[in-house]
Image (cartoon, rainbow, N blue to C red):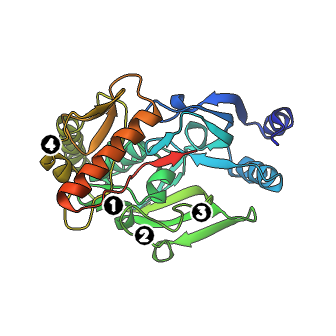
Amino acid sequence: MIDIKELSEKCTGLGCRIIPDCPLSNYVTFRTGGKCRGLIVINSTESAIEILKYIRSRGIKYFILGNGSNVIPVDEGFDGIVILMKNEFSGIDVRENVIECQSGALLSTVCTYAQKNGLSGMENLYGIPGTAGGALYMNAGAYGTEISDIILSAEYIDENGIVCKIERQDMELSYRHSIFSGKNLLITSVTFELTEGNTEEIRRKMTECLNKRQSKQPLEFPSAGSTFKRPQGSYASLLIEKCGLKGMTCGGAQVSEKHSGFVINKGGATCSDVLELCGKVQEIVKEKTGYTLELEPIILK
């Protein structure tokens, strides 16, 4: 049982905000999904620790959210508390060739900080619409670069409310996976190790990367990015296109005509539309090619 009034008083005492009965469609890039019982905007590691202690001690269901770029909430909503790690928890510090940032910092903002400080290694990640914490959570990557290539260490709050530090070699990093995947460990800070470079050359590479995204990806529509993980031995977009599924729709959801690896919200799409469409794509691709496509976004329910 969630006592929203008591939880609101707890948040007020910690200086952070809570939004009761919050529409999650406002906080995910797919712009769909129902409400959660309450969304808490975290402002410090200390408040995160206290909020986690409170909800864990009462057995309250919870989910940790960054920019919502890889999450699709179900239409029925989430009967629990969403902990938002974003704008109010987004500090960035640069020391020599190391960037340390709070987990709510947008990855593109961190890339810009790196560029301005003449630090190279993040150029290909520019434009990924996630936070630093979310990017580490799923070992995000693009154009040959993954978080695993530049991550040095991170800090997180464990099940006992203790802040722990973890080094790269212990993060179990692999394709779209880390030790945090599928766990409610709250990442508080991420530290990247980069190399010195020329600011203008770094800027040029970042611009090239962004132009490539804009020309090849349907960024003009809400989506959760790449909808399916890359199957071993092929590419999801290639398989989907070979099966003639570009432009296929279910309600307001569509397999993008621009990039078949994206399912987009053409307007008014529900989570049910998305799941129905993805299910059909998976079924047809399996039948015609033998490949099993696995969803990349988290379905929050």
Say above or below: 39 vs 107: above
User: Could you tell which of marks 1 and 3 lies nearer the N-terminus?
Assistant: 1
Q: Which numbered marker is on residue 244?
A: 4
In the figure, is residue 170 to the left or right of 117? right
Amino acid type at mark 3: Glu
Q: Which residue is mark 2?
A: 173
Q: Which residue is mark 3?
A: 155
Q: CA distance from mark 4 to mark 1?
A: 30 Å
Closer to the camera, 90 or 214?
214
In the figure, is residue 226 to the left or right of 270? left
Q: Which residue is mark 1?
A: 146
User: Could you tell which of marks 4 and 3 lies nearer the N-terminus?
Assistant: 3
Q: CA distance from mark 4 to mark 3?
A: 45 Å
Q: Is residue 111 visible?
A: yes
Say above or below: 82 vs 171: above
Q: Which numbered marker is on residue 263?
A: none
Quadrant where the image shows the N terminus = top right
Amino acid type at mark 1: Glu
Q: Residue at x 23, y 38 (%)?
A: 217
Asked whether the beta carbons under mark 2 and mark 3 sit within 8 Å of each other, the answer is no
Query: Foreground mark, 4 or 1?
Result: 4
Asked whether the beta carbons under mark 1 and mark 2 sit within 8 Å of each other, the answer is yes
User: Could you tell which of marks 4 and 1 lies nearer the N-terminus?
Assistant: 1
In the figure, is residue 245 to the left or right of 298? left
Task: Give the number of callouts.
Answer: 4
Q: Residue at x 77, y 55 (%)?
A: 56
Amino acid type at mark 2: Leu
Amino acid type at mark 4: Gly
Asked whether the beta carbons under mark 1 and mark 3 sit within 8 Å of each other, the answer is no
